[in-house]
């Protein structure tokens, strides 16, 4: 009963702000509610507060005992939804598939996947030494086991 009420309030709040979307929603047996959000332009503290209030202010505390945590997906969290890739175009990603791992700049997203580009040093076709070549890989969302933004400090 409480879970369905929270889900309905959460969905209504997310529909009001079309740039935010749900990454994870869980509720433990002791009514500890956890909501993890992401957004097309990121997630602010105010966004988390707005979603938290939309849920908390519409549930009677006398009827239900619960705790509520609303958070944004962390910078080091894996990308789990195709929608998350759009805001990361131009950033460097580490992408693991069943067959291999790629590190490159996310240059494009499509309906089916992503395009990564990077420079690599390879042996010259003729003669000694190496030459820098531009590499490009198209990866389907269905093939991605894990993708993370590589943070630079």
Image (tube, rainbow, N blue to C red):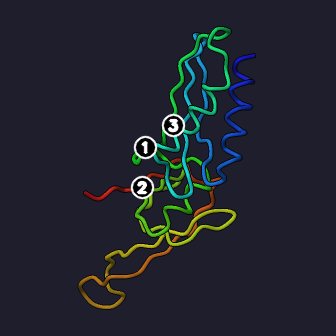
Circle 1 packing at 10 Å, graded few (<14), some (14-19), many (20+), is: few
Q: Earlier in the sequence, mark 3 or mark 1?
A: 3
Provide the residue designation for mark 1: 74
Circle 3 packing at 10 Å, graded few (<14), some (14-19), many (20+), is: some
Provide the residue designation for mark 2: 149
Q: Is residue 120 left or right of residue 51?
A: left
Q: CA distance from mark 3 to mark 2?
A: 26 Å
Residue 129: x %, y % from top left: 24, 84
Reply above or below: 22 against 98.
Answer: above
Residue 87: x %, y % from top left: 52, 61
Q: Residue at x 44, y 52 (%)?
A: 148
Q: Is residue 147 left or right of residue 26?
A: left
Q: Residue at x 61, y 31 (%)?
A: 25
Q: Nearer the viewer, mark 3 or mark 1?
A: 3
Residue 82: x %, y % from top left: 62, 55
Q: Tell me the number on the disc at residue 28.
A: none
Q: Residue at x 62, y 26 (%)?
A: 57
Provide the residue designation for mark 3: 49
Circle 2 packing at 10 Å, graded few (<14), some (14-19), many (20+), is: many
Q: CA distance from mark 1 to mark 2?
A: 11 Å
Confirm or deny contact between disc 1 and disc 2 (CB under 8 A).
Answer: no
Q: Quadrant of residue 124?
A: bottom left
Q: Secondary structure at mark 2?
A: strand
Q: Is residue 7 left or right of residue 30?
A: right
Quarter holding the N terminus is top right
Quarter holding the C terminus is bottom left
Q: Secondary structure at mark 3?
A: helix
Q: Earlier in the sequence, mark 1 or mark 2?
A: 1
């Amino acid at each position: 009963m409480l879970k369905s009420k929270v889900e309905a309030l959460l969905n209504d709040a997310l529909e009001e702000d079309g740039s935010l979307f749900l990454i994870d929603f869980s509720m433990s047996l002791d009514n500890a509610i956890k909501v993890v959000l992401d957004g097309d332009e990121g997630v602010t503290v105010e966004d988390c507060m707005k979603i938290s209030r939309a849920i908390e202010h519409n549930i009677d505390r006398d009827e239900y005992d619960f705790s509520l945590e609303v958070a944004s997906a962390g910078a080091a969290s894996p990308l789990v939804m195709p929608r998350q890739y759009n805001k990361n175009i131009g950033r460097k990603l580490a992408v693991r598939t069943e067959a291999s791992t790629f590190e490159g700049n996310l240059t494009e997203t499509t309906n089916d996947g992503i395009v990564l580009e990077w420079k690599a040093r390879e042996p010259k076709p003729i003669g000694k030494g190496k030459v820098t070549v531009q590499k490009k890989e198209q990866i389907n969302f269905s093939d991605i086991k894990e993708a993370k933004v590589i943070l630079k400090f």
